[in-house]
Amino acid sequence: MKKGMLVLAVLLFLGSFLFFDSMIEIKQRINICTAETTGVVVSVRSEYKDDTMTYYTTVEYNVNNQQYYKKGESGVSHKRGESVKVMYNPDNPKVSYIPGCEETDRENMIYGIFCISASLKCVFDAFNKKRR
């Protein structure tokens, strides 16, 4: 039982770390990217993933005559040449995000949720065995 509890603790820690680290990174990016500009979609690639269509978008934007590119993914398709809002860090315009098009922190969030779910299932299974 002690090995099982150790595995459970590791899964719960790993899951919590992956999930909350992804959330914190997204929140930090939102907090520091306070300046807004308009970018233009330069490419869109679609892929069927996890039973849904995912669109990978690349946006070109300019800050102080310097050209930058930002990649994002979402469930919403944009058209090439379409104008989109880009939020960027005024101290470092390369740090940016496209509202509604998040980067691939989603994988870490999914792994985190899986690890947390697996550890909770172990807890419930152990609890039900003790009650019998």
Image (tube, rainbow, N blue to C red):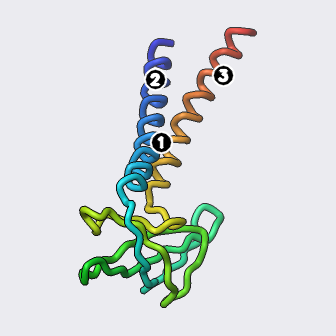
Q: Residues within 10 Å of mark 2 (few under 14, many from 20)?
A: some
Residue visible at 37% across and 73% down in the picture: 70
Q: Which mark is residue 19?
A: 1
Q: Which residue is mark 2?
A: 9
Under circle 2, the secondary element is: helix
Q: Residue furthest right?
A: 132
Residue visible at 38% across and 49% down in the picture: 28
First in sequence, mark 3 or 2: give its number: 2
Under circle 3, the secondary element is: helix
Q: Which residue is mark 3?
A: 124
First in sequence, mark 1 or 3: give its number: 1
Disc 3/disc 2 C-alpha distance (Å): 14 Å
Residue visible at 54% across and 77% down in the picture: 46
Name the residue type under label 3. Phe
Disc 2/disc 1 C-alpha distance (Å): 15 Å
Residue visible at 45% across and 49% down in the picture: 108
Q: Residues within 10 Å of mark 3 (few under 14, many from 20)?
A: few
Disc 1/disc 3 C-alpha distance (Å): 21 Å
Q: Position of residue 53 (x, y in %)?
A: 61, 71
Q: In the figure, 67 relative to 104: above or below?
A: below
Name the residue type under label 2. Ala
